[in-house]
């Protein structure tokens, strides 16, 4: 192995043998996974509740819009909040608010006074909390686990979410909803309460520290020459600062744009997958569900083996091969009529999705200054959510005008183009530098010593 390869993996032969994910991370993981299960239950139960009250497609689809809107409205200011306060306390507060919101909805359902308007209001509050909670969670991880174990930690977190939301929440929520409409929402309130308790038990202070108004050397943003306020203490100024830092960081900028573009084509593909399964593959509801299960199983496999696989093939080739798998998945959906082959393609895509999530999160956590991690994470979430929102509409429009396979051909072309354009960006030398210990972290203490 060359020197660059060793650096890229961030390997410390002694540290890798001795360092383990400790009790703090176990509590953090349990909180994340429990919260994800509850959110998954509500995500499935909410449209079931709406469909039991109305057959209007516009009202039903409005629920998805209400769920996605907070990601566009609050991801950027939420990142500023994450960088200003103790991230652990913020996550506990968000969970407490979500417990109250879900409890109000559950009691209203039990009392027979739950309206669709109340449901959508609660969904808006809960998803607004999820936006900030996700950014705070990603920003807190580097202070919870050793730097050399970021890939493993991110893999465990992604695997927990995939297992609970992708595989368990669907059938469990349907069963609980059949028993009593209020139960999935009551259980969701309980999972948020459990998450709050578990996060509160994670020892340490998780505040990024005060950032001098006119001197942020790690951001690369020029300071005010005359000492006058330059606007970076305002929410807007700090959002701009976070975006500007991301734009000037070649690897993370490219990764963020890629995720936005590929989310657009992926969401467009998934939006009409049920029609492809029915009209082209001649599958029923069970077959369609199994296709989604293939992707979820792949995601879990990728999460379990992700950190070891990334070390083996290197982060550079994890990213590059992932782009090829993305293109191959769209090609399979566009050209194949074999349900088995498409199931395998979705499984491979699930593995790739987990690996990409691990690699992207770990690179962002390694490269971003601690005092800006909330804003940079939220900027990436904003771009990602934008791709999801546009893709959800685009898939139906393209399929209606050009045929059911058209969104997959578009996805294939986009994946091939971005692979060719970005292939050199993720070269071994640049990724190796990302895995080397950056200067701005040399004096950054662990959470327990943060001010």
Image (tube, rainbow, N blue to C red):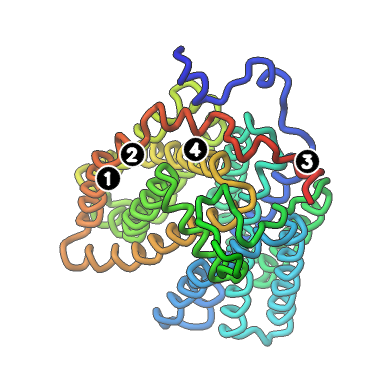
- The residue at which mark 4 appears reads as 359
Give whichever of 224, 32 is nearer the camera: 224
Instruction: Determine contact: label 1, label 2, CB under 8 Å.
Output: yes
Q: CA distance from mark 1 to mark 3?
A: 39 Å
- Callout 1 crowding tier (Cα within 10 Å): few <14, some 14–19, many ≥20: some
Give whichever of 349, 130 is nearer the camera: 130
- Callout 3 crowding tier (Cα within 10 Å): few <14, some 14–19, many ≥20: some
Q: CA distance from mark 1 to mark 4?
A: 18 Å
Q: CA distance from mark 2 to mark 3?
A: 34 Å
- The residue at which mark 1 appears reads as 418
Res 294 → quadrant: top left
Instruction: Determine contact: label 1, label 4, CB under 8 Å.
Output: no
Query: In the orientation shown, which residue stands out farthest toward the top?
Result: 1
Give whichever of 392, 154 is nearer the camera: 154
Secondary structure of the residue carrying numbered label 3: helix
Q: Tell whether 21 sits left or right of 227.
A: right
Q: Earlier in the sequence, mark 4 or mark 3?
A: 3
Q: CA distance from mark 4 to mark 3?
A: 22 Å
Secondary structure of the residue carrying numbered label 4: helix
One can see residue 127 in this view: no
Tell me where residue 422 appears, x and y as whole percent.
Answer: 30, 40
Instruction: Determine contact: label 4, label 3, CB under 8 Å.
Output: no
Res 317 → quadrant: top left
Tell me where residue 199 appears, x and y as whole percent.
Answer: 77, 52
Q: Earlier in the sequence, mark 1 or mark 4?
A: 4
Tell me where residue 288 appears, x and y as whole percent.
Answer: 39, 52
Q: Earlier in the sequence, mark 2 or mark 3?
A: 3
Q: CA distance from mark 2 to mark 4?
A: 13 Å
- The residue at which mark 3 appears reads as 24
Checking the image for residue 323, the label placed there is 2
Instruction: Determine contact: label 1, label 3, CB under 8 Å.
Output: no
Q: Tell whether 157 sits left or right of 432.
A: right
């Amino acid at each position: 192995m060359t020197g660059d390869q060793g650096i890229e993996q961030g390997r410390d032969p002694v540290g890798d043998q001795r360092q383990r994910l400790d009790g703090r991370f176990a509590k953090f993981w349990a909180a994340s996974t429990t919260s994800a299960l509850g959110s998954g239950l509500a995500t499935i139960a909410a449209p079931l509740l709406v469909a039991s009250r109305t057959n209007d497609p516009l009202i039903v689809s409005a629920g998805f819009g209400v769920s996605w809107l907070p990601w566009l409205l609050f991801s950027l200011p939420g990142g500023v909040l994450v960088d200003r306060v103790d991230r652990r306390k913020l996550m506990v507060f968000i969970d407490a608010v979500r417990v109250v919101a879900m409890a109000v909805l559950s009691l209203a359902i039990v009392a027979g006074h739950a309206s669709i308007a109340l449901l959508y209001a609660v969904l808006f509050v809960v998803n607004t909390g999820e936006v900030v909670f996700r950014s705070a969670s990603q920003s807190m991880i580097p202070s919870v686990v050793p730097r050399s174990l970021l890939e493993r930690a991110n893999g465990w977190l992604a695997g927990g979410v995939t297992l609970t939301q992708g595989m368990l929440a669907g059938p469990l929520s349907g069963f609980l909803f059949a028993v009593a409409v209020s139960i999935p929402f009551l259980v969701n309130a309980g999972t948020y309460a459990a998450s709050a308790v578990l996060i509160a038990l994670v020892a340490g202070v998780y505040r990024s520290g005060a950032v001098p108004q006119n001197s942020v050397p790690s951001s690369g943003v020029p300071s005010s020459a005359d000492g006058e306020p330059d606007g970076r203490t305002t929410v807007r100024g700090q959002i701009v600062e976070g975006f500007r830092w991301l734009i000037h960081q070649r690897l993370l900028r490219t990764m963020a744009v890629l995720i936005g573009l590929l989310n657009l084509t992926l969401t467009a593909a998934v939006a009409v997958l049920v029609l492809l399964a029915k009209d082209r593959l001649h599958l029923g509801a069970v077959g369609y569900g199994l296709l989604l299960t293939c992707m979820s199983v792949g995601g879990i496999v990728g999460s379990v083996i992700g950190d070891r696989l990334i070390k083996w093939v290197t982060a550079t080739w994890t990213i590059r091969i992932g782009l090829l798998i993305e293109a191959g998945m769209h090609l399979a959906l566009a050209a194949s009529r074999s349900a088995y082959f498409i199931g395998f393609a979705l499984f491979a895509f699930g593995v790739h999705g987990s690996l990409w999530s691990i690699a992207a999160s770990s690179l962002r956590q390694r490269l971003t200054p601690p005092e800006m991690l909330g804003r940079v994470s939220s900027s990436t979430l904003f771009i990602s959510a934008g791709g999801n929102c546009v893709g959800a509409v685009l898939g139906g429009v393209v399929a209606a005008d050009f045929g059911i396979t058209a969104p997959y051909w578009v996805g294939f072309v986009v994946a091939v183009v971005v692979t060719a354009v970005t292939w050199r960006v993720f070269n071994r030398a640049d990724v190796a530098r990302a895995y080397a210990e950056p200067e701005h972290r040399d004096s950054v203490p662990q959470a327990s010593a943060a001010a």
